[in-house]
Amino acid sequence: MPVETTAAGVLPAVVRMPQAGMYVGASESAAPVLEHLYAQSDRWDDVQVYSYQGIAEA
């Protein structure tokens, strides 16, 4: 998933990623999309590393 940076090329501190996949079920409609949170946690050789923080609260 593309993540937008600031004009200076800085990545955001927290990234929200929607749950991906298919819907298979008996209900007429799918449940709401869950957003998973990732926060900057480290930097390795000039690459920003994000770690999983859990599901965003509605």
Image (cartoon, rainbow, N blue to C red):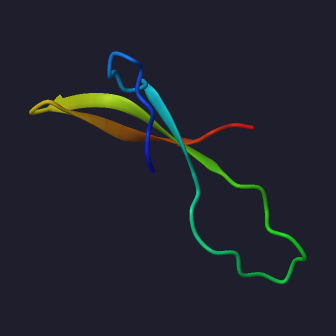
Q: 52 or 46, which is in the foreground?
A: 46
Residue 31 % position (x, y): 79, 62
Query: 22 or 4: nearer the eye?
Result: 4
Q: Quadrant of residue 27?
A: bottom right
Left or right, residue 37 beside residue 49:
right
* In-image side of 25 versus 49 (left or right): right
Asked whether 33 or 5 is in front, the reply is 5
Number of residue marks: 0
Q: Residue furthest left?
A: 45
* Farthest residue, direction front: 7
The residue sitting at the top extreme is 8
Q: Is residue 2 above or below residue 10?
A: below
Residue visible at 75% across and 38% down in the picture: 58
Residue 20 is left or right of residue 14, and the answer is right
Give residue 24's quadrant in the image.
bottom right
Q: Residue at x 45, y 33 (%)?
A: 4
Position in image of residue 11 (x %, y %): 37, 26
Would you identify the image quadrant in which residue 43 lies?
Answer: top left
Residue 30, placed above or below residue 10: below
User: Which residue sits at x=31%, y=29%?
Assistant: 41
Q: Residue furthest right?
A: 28
- Residue 37 in the image: x percent, y percent? 52, 39
* 16 vs 40: above or below: below
**At x 66% / y 51%, what residue is drawn?**
34
